[in-house]
Image (cartoon, rainbow, N blue to C red):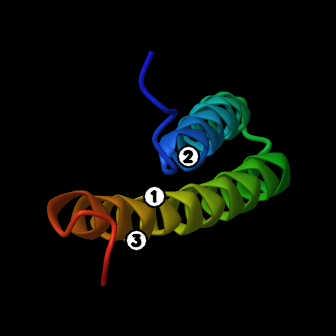
Amino acid sequence: MPDKHPASEDHRKAAEHHTKAAEHHTKAATAHEAGKHAEGSEHAHHAAGHHAHATEHANAAAKKTVAHSDASTSGGKK
């Protein structure tokens, strides 16, 4: 069985944050439709935070993928 790719966990965490962001976007939409604008804005703020965390994990995954790819093509030597 091949070794776990070094970026796997970052991809998983990015996906989790995207899911949490989507949940907050849904809650924000529901609150706004009900005229609860302060609550909707709060959920939108939380969604933005999850998007930022997802981006951090995605960027980390990309860096690890490049490093892993470079090591693979150079026989593990840099």
Depth check: 11 or 29 in front?
Answer: 11
* Quadrant (top left, top right, bottom left, bottom right) of the N terminus: top left
Q: Is residue 33 above or below residue 44?
A: above
Question: The residue under label 2 is which amino acid type?
Answer: Ala
Depth check: 36 or 12 in front?
Answer: 12
Say which residue label 3 marks.
Answer: 63
Q: Is residue 45 above or below residue 15?
A: below
Q: What element carries label 3?
A: helix
Q: Is residue 23 above or below residue 66?
A: above
Q: Is mark 1 on a helix, strand or loop?
A: helix
Question: The residue under label 1 is which amino acid type?
Answer: Ala
Say which residue label 1 marks.
Answer: 61
Among the two numbered marks 1 and 2 on one chain, the one whose residue lies closer to the N terminus: 2
Task: Kindly check if marks 1 and 2 are in contact, taking CB atoms under 8 A apart as contact.
Answer: yes
Residue lying at 66% horizontally and 30% vertically, measured from the top left: 23
Residue 36 location (% of width, % of height): 80, 42
Residue 60 location (% of width, % of height): 51, 67
Q: In this view, does 2 lie above or below 49?
A: above
As drawn, the label of residue 14 is: 2
Q: Residue furthest top?
A: 1
